[in-house]
Amino acid sequence: RESDLRTNRISNVLLEIYMTVQTSMTTDVKVMNPDDTIQTAAEAMAYMDIGLLPVSEHDRLVGMISDRDIAGRGVAAGQ
């Protein structure tokens, strides 16, 4: 049936997306704390050559910080 074929195609696409993310993701993750300084985050990004870090508090993801966030705040502060 056509609906079964469509469901099967959707399942295959979703599986491919999952596999692509899984094979492309970083597994050695550095996590920042909300109380860390912007400078600490920037240094960690520079050292690891990355542009995005998760922010966690009590083993719960509470946000993300990017190099763009840091640069924007630096420009806004006149630095």
Image: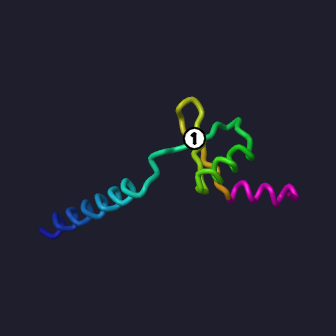
**Residue 70 covered by magenta stretch:** yes
Q: Looking at this rendering, what residue extends furthest in the top direction?
A: 58
Residue 72 lies, in percent from the top left, at 75, 59
- Is 55 or 50 nearer to us in this picture? 50
Residue 79 lies, in percent from the top left, at 85, 57
Q: Identity of the amino acid at label 1?
A: Val
The quarter of the picture where residue 50 lies is bottom right
Residue positioned 29% across, 64% down in the render: 13
As helix, strand or loop, the secondary structure at mark 1 comes to: loop
Tell me: 45 left or right of 76. Answer: left
- Is 3 or 5 nearer to us in this picture? 5
Q: Quadrant of the N terminus?
A: bottom left
Residue 68's place in the image compared with 42, above or below, is below
**From which residue to which does the magenta span run?**
68-79
Residue 71's place in the image compared with 1, above or below, is above
Magenta stretch: dominant SS?
helix
Residue 39 lies, in percent from the top left, at 74, 46
**Residue 7 covered by magenta stretch:** no
Tally of numbered tags? 1
Residue positioned 68% across, 59% down in the render: 68
Which residue lies under the disc numbered 1?
Answer: 31
Residue 62's place in the image compared with 42, above or below, is above
Q: Looking at this rendering, what residue extends furthest in the bottom direction?
A: 2
Residue positioned 63% across, 51% down in the render: 47
Residue positioned 70% across, 55% down in the render: 69
Tell me: 53 left or right of 38. Answer: left
The quarter of the picture where residue 12 lies is bottom left
Tell me: 75 left or right of 1. Answer: right
- Is 60 or 23 nearer to us in this picture? 23
